[in-house]
Every structure is written in structure tokens, then in C-alpha cells.
Amino acid sequence: MKILVTGSKGQLGSKIKDLSVDFQSFSFSFTDLDELDITNFNSVLDFFKFEKPDIVINCAAYTAVDKAEDDYENAFKINALGPENLAKACNVHNSKFIHISTDYVFDGKEREKPYLESDFTSPQSVYGSTKLEGENLVLKNLQDAIIVRTAWLYSEYGHNFVKTMLNLAQSRTELSVVNDQVGSPTYAGDLAQAILQISMQYFEENYWKSGVYHFSNLGKCTWFEFAKEIFKIKNINIKVNPVTSEEFPSKVKRPKYSVLDKEKIITTYKIDVPDWRDSLKIVLEKL
């Protein structure tokens, strides 16, 4: 069985690549913009004709949240048009499709209860709105697609909060970190494992339950608490000050609450979801 992974140089794509050696039943094709421009439908169709993928995992995304506010055209192309093209090609070639989305489809306002997949969406940014448009276009063109929303992603690869904190700690003795946004840090390796487990169940048992799912690590924290845990595990002596979002002016309103309810993916696919602190320890050992 052949799996096509788009956006393979990002955090999630890189972790799927790492884990692919454990899934010998699959033949993987890892692509990024250099190999496949998902915003070009004819290119996508030509690629599918040649590769004939059984499952497509779309990790490609425009994730520069602040930059997207002034770059709607490119954000829309990558986050909405690209997934639509992949969904159409999957329809033509009878391929299964797993598309990655985000907690930014919610507004995160006045909330204390984890978001269900069925909860009302109300994105507050170009990034969030283009990702939601991507979800809608995928499901419009491919009813049996799987969409997995995630949040607060980090790993050994790319740019992320964990690596930023470690880098800043090398040159500072004091940091200020936002303490009024609540979410669940998600290790890209855990999400990659879940996606490959879903793919394996389709391969071994022809088991495929389409729809929208949420995946992040168990537990919740603020960015301030996340930073404190990073420095605690690494035994780094640095003063961390809790501050409000207003003290960090930004073009984008980040969701104040973006904890996702994981029960659907856990029960449907028997996914084992680790606590965020346990996964953070694993990553920090590698870093």
C-alpha cells in the first residue's frame, strides 16, 4: 500500500518520515513544494497518475499566523485550494485522504470546556479562516475524508515554542510568557503515530471511519506553564514572568482557550494519547 505525504519537511511530515521505518507494510512517497505543488490541480493529477497513492496525508499548510493577515492569497492557496485539489484527485483515483487542520477554526472565547468536533466554528484570523475553508472544500469534494484538527504542535524539527524557549534561555536570565491562553501542547510524533495507526487499520482491516477528529496530547496548560515545565525538565535556572496577551501586541487574536476533546478519535480508532508532560520529556531528551 502506498502513502503519499505532502508537506513532508514540516514538523508533522518529518515525524511521519521518522516513524515510517516501523511501517514496512507501506511504501511512502514524501513530497514538499519542490516535488509537488498542491495548489496546481494539473500537477496534482499528473502526480497521482504516476504515484497511484492509496492514502494521502496532507501535512502541507501556511502556518505563519501573523504573516497570513497580510497574505490572504497565498494562505488561501495553500490552506484551502491545495487541500481541495488533493481531495478532487483522491476522488478520481479512489484514494483515502487524511487532512490536518487546526484549533484556530474556533474563537476560543469564554470557554472552559474542551471543544468537540461538532462545536460551532468561528475563526478569528486569516490563518483560521483559510484552514476552515480547506476543511469545507475537502468534505465538499470527498465525503469519506478524515480531517484531524490539532493544536500547539512542537517537535525536534522546525520552529516551535519549545525550541524558542530553549534558545532564549541561552542568552537571558528572565523571560515573560503569556499566561491567559490555555491549550494542550501536542508532540508531532504522537500525532504522526496516530495518523499511521489509522492508516494501518485501513490496510489491515479495511476499517475507515470518515469525518472530523481532534488530536492533541492529554492535559492542559498555559504558555507560561508550558515554559516553566520545559525549564524544570531541562533543569534550567531562569525567571519566568506570567503576562497577559495584551502585553504582547499581535496582528492576530490567538484563541484564549483551545483545548480539544479527544474522545472521538480515542474510541473510534483505539488511539493511545499520552499526557503532554510525558511527551515533552521525550522530546527534551532528544534536544
Image (cartoon, grey):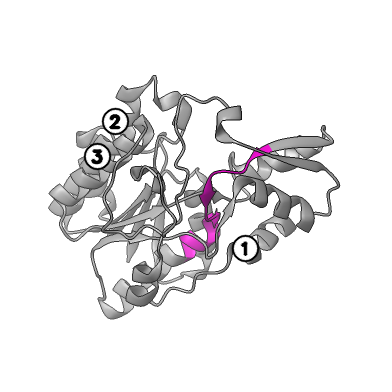
Q: Which residues are magenta?
A: 177-193
Task: Give the alpha-carbon distance from disc 3 to disc 2, as whole Å.
Answer: 10 Å
State which quarter of the image contains the N terminus. Answer: bottom left
Residue 155 seen in this snapshot: yes
> Which is closer to the viewer, label 3 or label 2?
3
Left or right for 68, reference 178? left
Q: Which mark is residue 279?
A: 1
| First reached walking from the N terminus: tag 1 or tag 2 | 2
The stretch drawn in magenta includes residue 18:
no
Residue 287 seen in this snapshot: no
Left or right for 279, reference 218? right
Residue drawn at the location 44% of the way across and 66% of the way down: 194
What element does badge 2 sit on? helix
Q: Which mark is residue 77?
A: 2
Task: Give the alpha-carbon distance from disc 1 to disc 2, as whole Å.
Answer: 33 Å
Left or right for 270, reference 180? left
Task: Give the alpha-carbon distance from disc 1 to disc 3, as whole Å.
Answer: 31 Å
> Which is closer to the viewer, label 1 or label 2?
1
Contact flag, marks 1 and 2 (Cβ < 8 Å): no
What element does badge 1 sit on? helix
Q: Which mark is residue 133?
A: 3
Identify which amino acid the numbered label 3 is placed on: Glu
Residue lying at the far front of the rendered structure: 110
Residue 220, percent from left and from top: 55, 59
281 above or below 150?
A: below
3 above or below 69?
A: below
78 above or below 282?
A: above
Q: Residues within 10 Å of mark 1 (few under 14, many from 20)?
A: many
Identify which amino acid the numbered label 2 is placed on: Lys
Residue drawn at the location 29% of the way across and 51% of the way down: 51
**Closest to the observer: 176 or 97?**
176
| First reached walking from the N terminus: tag 3 or tag 2 | 2
